[in-house]
Image (cartoon, rainbow, N blue to C red):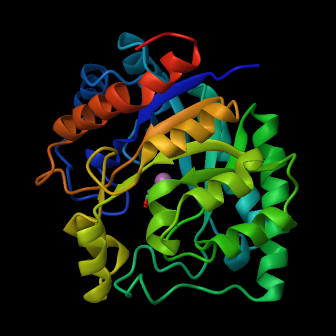
Amino acid sequence: MGTQILWGIAPIGWRNDDIPEIGAGNTLQHLLSDIVVAGFQGTEVGGFFPEPTILNKELSLRKLKIAGKWFSSFIIRDGIESAKAAFHEHCKYLQEVHAAVAVVSEQTHSVQGTSENVFTTKPHFTEQEWSLLCTGLNELGKIAEAYQLKLVYHHHMGTGVQTLAEIDRLMDNTDANHVHLLYDTGHIYVSDGDYMTLLVKHRNRIKHVHFKDVRESERTACSNEGLSFLQSFLRGMFTVPGDGCIDFTEVYAYLLKTDYSGWIVIEAEQDPAIANPLEYALIARNYIDQNLLVQTYKEEGNVV
Ligand SMILES: O=C1C[C@@H](O)[C@H](O)[C@@H](O)C1=O
Ligand SMILES: [Co+2]
């Protein structure tokens, strides 16, 4: 067995699909070259990425890989058949860029992209909606496998699968063979004020990881002011590991102890006009090298 971890960083610090205007001047080439400078092995696909042959060329020039890509599903709103058709297209693209996972988030009734207070407003699915969602995800999971991908579900602020209780329900009612979990430290911390319980409870379903850190003072301010999800990230609620309040040494130690293999993707949405993306990528890299990789080194029996 043993642990095989690939380290990536998401485009979200350079350009953000939730607010496409910010960082719009950052090109694909600029982003990918910054990722190389910061010493990461790959990234996730952003909405502005080109078709597979062009992307593969730019990736191979820099020896970078693609981990996966976000997919907003509307299983509840549009029905399973409609979601399946869109997901086939998504998986086809991902297979062509040799990705490992398809990141799925159900966006029916979501307030993620709205001006609603994300700390007090979120959808609560009915019994019928839960049943449709879980059945639909099982179907999408099988489609992902046909493209040599794993479907990993992204719990997310402002959506119907946000809290630990909601993630429990999703895990309990979907097929573990087809529906896996993406563990995002930042989202579960902002939602529940805790990140270890989810990790320990559902470690056996976790097949993809986002390391997102949180500035506690900004989280409190955003919550007190009743900001939306988009306003909160523009305000600086999220940051890279090493710059916020999450103890990633604890998270990483647990992943190592349980032989996690796969991608860990640094993901911190910030306004690139305020937080220089390369500078923050280097802060993350430095934190990983100084605080996390030293654990792998010790596990291998080395003396530090
Ligand atoms: O994985 C993610 C993808 C983004 O589009 C999303 O809004 C962000 O919060 C996230 O965690
Ligand atoms: Co995420």
x and y percentages locating residue 300 in the rendered image: 58, 13
Q: Residue at x 24, y 27 (%)?
A: 34
Residue 5 vs 137, above or below: the answer is above
x and y percentages locating residue 127 in the rendered image: 82, 87
For this orientation, the residue located farthest to the left is: 274
Q: Residue at x 45, y 89 (%)?
A: 120
Q: Quadrant of residue 245?
A: bottom left
Frontmost residue, 90 versus 248: 248
x and y percentages locating residue 68 in the rendered image: 56, 38
Q: Quadrant of the N terminus?
A: top right
Q: Residue at x 53, y 45 (%)?
A: 251
Frontmost residue, 95 versus 266: 266
Residue 101 vs 32, above or below: the answer is below
Residue 160 vs 150, above or below: the answer is below
Question: How many marks on residues?
Answer: 0
x and y percentages locating residue 167 in the rendered image: 69, 67
Please state if 12 lies on the left or on the right of 175 as rendered. left
Frontmost residue, 250 versus 288: 250
In which quadrant of this rendering is ligand 1 seen?
A: bottom left
Q: Quadrant of residue 42?
A: top left
Please state if 265 lies on the left or on the right of 181 as rendered. left
Q: Is residue 119 visible?
A: yes
For this orientation, the residue located farthest to the front is: 303
Q: Residue at x 44, y 74 (%)?
A: 112
Q: Is residue 45 visible?
A: no
Residue 39 vs 150, above or below: the answer is above
Q: Quadrant of the C terminus?
A: top left
Please state if 98 lies on the left or on the right of 222 as rendered. right
Frontmost residue, 283 versus 16: 283
